[in-house]
Image: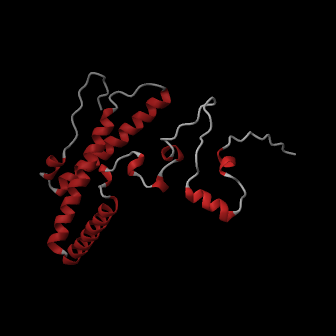
Amino acid sequence: MNQQPGSKVGREWSAAQIRNKSFEDIQKLWFVLLKERNMLLTYRHQCKHLGEEMVQPERLQKVSKSMKAIKVVLGERYREYKQATDWKWCEQRAVLHERRRQYLARRRRRTGLPPDQRPKVPGGLAVWRMSKQQKFADLKPRQPDEPPPTGQLPEKMQHERATNGHGQTPEDLLRKKPKQLKEYV
């Protein structure tokens, strides 16, 4: 293997190129790529051990992309073979496809938007999924020189005060309470 910095390295194999190959050629190509990948990983480990920089590290990505393309083509060929020979497999795939379609339709009805189009802001999240920061993002703390709020409590709170018997008047609830120092023994 030529590991000179100026040497050119070829590009990865595309799925379109691999589709034109026979099974035997694909198998040979797989083992050539496997050997190349192992050599590059060994070289990378050696460079890390010696504290050197690896020459053309993009070669590893090219090899892995080529291997992924081989897997894609073999998967396509397997599905075509199964469709041509196994009717039970086709029925199972149809059932799985229908279940997936129904699941996505239910989720779309529930959320109104597909997952990739949902907003990432609190308005699009369920309350139980929000963090405290998201829930109370619109609240602002009262300034120290600002007086406490005045006015009437809502009717519902006044009614609960009478029935619950906690004994606090609306003035007590709105009054600024002094901080109490707690002592621990």
Q: Position of residue 141 (x, y in %)?
A: 57, 36
Q: Give the residue at the far front of this rendering.
A: 152
Residue 40 at x, y = what percent? 36, 37
In-image side of 130 versus 40 (left or right): right
Q: Quadrant of the N terminus?
A: top left
Q: Nearer the viewer, residue 25 or 162?
A: 162
Q: Quadrant of the C terminus?
A: top right
Residue 71: horizontal and vertical position, in percent? 26, 54
Asked whether 80 or 127 is in front, the reply is: 127
Tell me: 72 left or right of 49.
left
State the residue lying farthest toward the top.
6
What residue do we see at 71% from left, 59% from top?
A: 166
Q: Position of residue 164 (x, y in %)?
A: 68, 64
Front residue of 178/153: it is: 153
- Taking 9 as reference, is 93 above or below it? below
Residue 98: image quadrant is bottom left
User: 146 or 66: nearer the eye?
Assistant: 146
Residue that appears at 14% across and 71% down = 84
183 relative position to 138: left or right? right
In this picture, is 58 found above or below 18?
above
Q: Residue drawn 49% across and 31% down? A: 49
Please, is residue 158 above or below residue 54 in the view?
Answer: below
Q: Most extreme residue toward the bottom, as rendered?
A: 88
**Image color mode:** secondary structure
Q: Is residue 107 left or right of residue 28?
A: right
Q: Quick one: which residue is furthest to the right in this view?
A: 185
